[in-house]
């Protein structure tokens, strides 16, 4: 948090106000920060890269729907580092100005929220059109202007846009948690238990991925996630993203990364940051 007499930290997030990303940013930085809504995840990267924001908060994965691919794809070429993470429990409600279910003609929300509530929508609003928009908050804003619309979103969005919660927690899974990355230009000092995110490209030869895993297993480092994405540089070329426990500048992970560097074609540490459970 900024010290007394200094300017508040500027935080870019996926807007408009009252999105889950906004909620995650508030949880991490508190009310004293200056919040700058962006129209897309790519725009959040841009704002931090050019210095209009000091930090950016972007969704990276949901426990039910998996990875937010645009975030991983942008991390491949961005000079930004991961300076923190936020794990936000997600409760999705039906928000509207309609008097009842029979008055709803369309339901709007972010694609991930739609996917998480698909079964509920099919059961309780069969035949009602479902439309994907850029954010849950944008859906709530649209619903506030038209009583025939409903949005899938949070209680914060309902309060912000003057909507009522017509049905609660449409995503019935108890494990619905979204993980967010905090983006910055510079690494953050070590504080408490650390997690490190990295990306690498294996050599184009048999057994390359197996050999890349060797240093990690040999050092006893706990790998918490691994995922591949097309590199978009040539056909059938992939970038691997990995999360491991520990700090990149301290043993045993520091030595492990040196060994890994010798086994892969390319390795970049995306950041070491305080781990949040």
Image: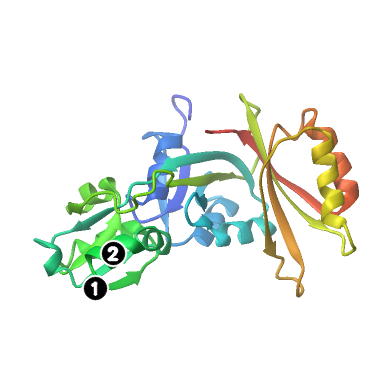
Q: Quadrant of residue 120?
A: bottom left
Residue 29 placement, left or right of 198: left
Q: Are marks 1 and 2 in contact (CB under 8 Å)?
A: yes
Residue at image point 19% right, 61% down: 144
Name the outermost residue toward the left: 99
Using a 10 Å C-alpha cutoff, classify the residue at mark 1 as few (fewer than 14 neighbours), some (14 to 19) or many (20 or more).
some
SS for callout 2: helix
N-terminal of the two: label 1 or label 2?
A: 2
Residue 128's mark?
Answer: 1
Would you place residue 93 above or below residue 3 in this image? below
What number is the disc on residue 13? none
In the image, 204 versus 59, the foreground residue is 204
Q: Is residue 38 above or below residue 108?
A: above
The residue lying toward the viewer, choosing from 211 and 19, is: 211
Q: Secondary structure at mark 1?
A: loop
The residue under the point 50% across, 59% down is 41
224 sits to left or right of 205: left
- Residue found at the far front of this picture: 123
Q: Tag 2: Cα neighbours inside 10 Å, few (<14), some, or many (≥20)?
A: some
The residue singled out by tag 2 in the image is 121
Residue 223 on image: x %, y %: 70, 40
Counting every numbered tag in the picture gives 2
Residue at horizontal 85 percent and vertical 34 percent from the top: 255
Residue 34 showing in the rendered view: no
Cα distance, mark 1 to mark 2?
A: 8 Å
In this view of the protein, which residue sits in the foreground, 84 or 49?
84
Q: Quadrant of residue 135?
A: bottom left
């Amino acid at each position: 948090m900024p010290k007394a007499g200094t300017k508040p930290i500027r935080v870019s997030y996926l807007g408009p106000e009252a999105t889950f990303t906004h909620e995650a940013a508030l949880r991490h930085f508190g009310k004293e920060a200056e919040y700058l809504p962006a129209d897309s995840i790519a725009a959040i990267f841009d704002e931090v890269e050019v210095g209009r924001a000091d930090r950016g908060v972007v969704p990276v994965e949901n426990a039910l729907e998996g990875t937010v691919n645009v975030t991983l794809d942008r991390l491949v070429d961005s000079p930004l580092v991961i300076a923190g993470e936020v794990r936000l429990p997600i409760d999705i409600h039906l928000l509207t100005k309609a008097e009842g279910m029979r008055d709803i003609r369309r339901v709007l929300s972010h694609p991930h929220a739609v996917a998480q509530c698909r079964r509920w929508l099919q059961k309780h609003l069969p035949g009602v059109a479902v439309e994907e928009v850029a954010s849950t908050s944008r859906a709530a804003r649209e619903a506030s202007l038209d009583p025939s619309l409903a949005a899938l979103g949070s209680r914060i969005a309902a309060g912000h846009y003057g909507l009522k919660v017509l049905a609660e927690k449409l995503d019935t899974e108890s494990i619905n948690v979204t993980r967010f990355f905090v983006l910055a230009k510079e690494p953050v000092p070590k504080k408490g238990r650390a997690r490190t995110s990295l990306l690498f490209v294996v050599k184009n030869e048999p057994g390359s991925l197996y050999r890349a895993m060797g240093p990690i297993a040999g050092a006893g480092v706990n790998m918490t996630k691994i995922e591949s994405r097309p590199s978009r540089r040539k056909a059938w070329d992939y970038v691997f993203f990995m999360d491991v426990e520990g700090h990149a500048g301290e043993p045993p992970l520091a030595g492990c990364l040196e060994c890994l560097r010798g086994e892969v074609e390319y390795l970049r540490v995306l950041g070491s940051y305080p781990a949040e459970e």
